Image (cartoon, rainbow, N blue to C red):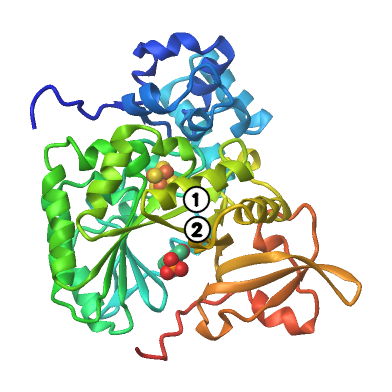
Amino acid sequence: MTDTQPRYRAITLSNVSKVPQWEKLDSELREAVETVARVLPFRTNAYLMDELIDWDSVPNDPIFQLTFPQCEMLEDDQYARVRDAIEREAGKEEMNAIVNEIRMELNPHPAGQMTHNVPHINGEPIPGMQHKYRETALFFPSQGQTCHAYCTFCFRWAQFVGMDGLKFANKEADQLGQYVANHREITDVLFTGGDPMVMKAKIFERYVDQLLEIDHVRTIRIGSKSLAYWPQRYVTDGDADEMLSLFERIVDAGKQVAFMAHCSHPVEFDPEIARTAISRIRSTGANIRMQSPVIRHVNDDPMAWRDMWITGTRLGMIPYYMFVERDTGAKNYFEMPLERCWEIFRAAYQRVPGTARTVRGPSMSCHPGKVHILGVTEIAGEKAFMLEFLQARKPELVRQPFFAKYDPTATWFDQLEPLSENDVPFFQRDLDTVDLSVSV
Ligand SMILES: *Cc1c(COP(=O)(O)O)cnc(C)c1O
Ligand code: SF4
């Protein structure tokens, strides 16, 4: 590490007007940033500004849409309320009240995240964990609850504006170890956030060490957007080598490191440093899987997905999931009809070789499970969505095809209705417990 290496610097509402590219935005776009960023989190960095955004294509540039707040992300009346408060220089308290009111209108806690899925030790909740599907426990290390930049559509946006960050954060590495050791059905532990790769290698190591001795843990997963937002993390950052050595140590301990890369668009792989990061991670024996939601304005283009899967495969990554944007935050701006999501998936999937057809989607992470949209079809003369669970609170429901009434405007599972009596069991809205009755 030398002083000449680029250092990570966050760009937020407080300093964005000082970066050179600010001059390239017209006054409407600037106003939108200054207004919407009061309500929704805004954070970008110099790498994204200099390397990934094509400023000649702004505002339509996908990475600009991915990281910069847009006027239409708020409803007209919400935008007007914030704008009005800014213009009459409302006091801090009044501004906070207005902003909080709007945040509450944006469904900050989708899919029962805060109230369900939280595991317990001796009757005490462990707030930094989620255990929804039998084999995989999610862990939210407290030091990983931020990201190198924020996606405008992020379903965890509420934690970045301080609405629930602390409740989700886990400080106790030994609680993680204890819970996982007691649950032999857990084979995969997924570190998530925020982005766990904002953590120093030394801190991440403390958590990992809790798991290396547990025989039934076979895979340590790392959910991260860092390949796109800060590939320097694996190349030039002070502890880049240390992090890679840790991956190697996990592999040497006989476990898989599955790096779950959040990839939104193929331009994320253009810079040389991103390719170097991918190759350095792979050289540790880790493998990289690609997953991302399909988002209007960002990647609602089958050719972007085709290119992403083809380039990603060539770089040694495995296409894994295409998700549907969740029902939270600025969803009105980003969401698309489910049928459209399926069309994008299908058009891209038809154009890639079998080696890239490891991808599944589009998939909705909803309360009862991960619902895979298999397509639109006709059953006994009636148009219908054909669906299946890829993951479910009730594991016996997985991979059983079921049907919902066709609805060309539906954007989320909640809006769908069972096609017939047979489909009703798949639509149970209130399944509180994880069924862990089958042990591995
Ligand atoms: C998506 C998800 C997982 C991981 O599912 P896989 O199909 O194993 O990738 C685990 N827990 C929750 C809550 C999830 O939403
Ligand atoms: S990287 Fe992930 S957690 Fe971070 S803002 Fe983007 S979607 Fe949200």
Residue 266 in the image: state x and y as whole percent: 48, 40
Residue at image coords 42%, 14%: 21
The C terminus lies in quadrant: bottom left
Q: Is residue 390 above or below residue 221?
A: below
Q: Is residue 358 above or below residue 420?
A: above
Q: In what element is the residue under mark 1?
A: helix
Quarter of the image for residue 386 reads: bottom right
Q: Residue furthest bottom?
A: 438
Q: Amino acid at mark 2?
A: Ala
Residue 55: numbered disc: none
Evaluate if marks 1 and 2 touch, with contact meaning CB atoms under 8 Å apart.
yes
Left or right: where 179 falls relative to 114 = left
Q: Quadrant of ligand 1?
A: bottom left
Residue 51 in the image: state x and y as whole percent: 37, 25
Question: Which residue is disc 1 drawn over?
Answer: 309
Residue 77 in the image: state x and y as whole percent: 67, 29
Q: Nearer the viewer, residue 9 or 272?
A: 272
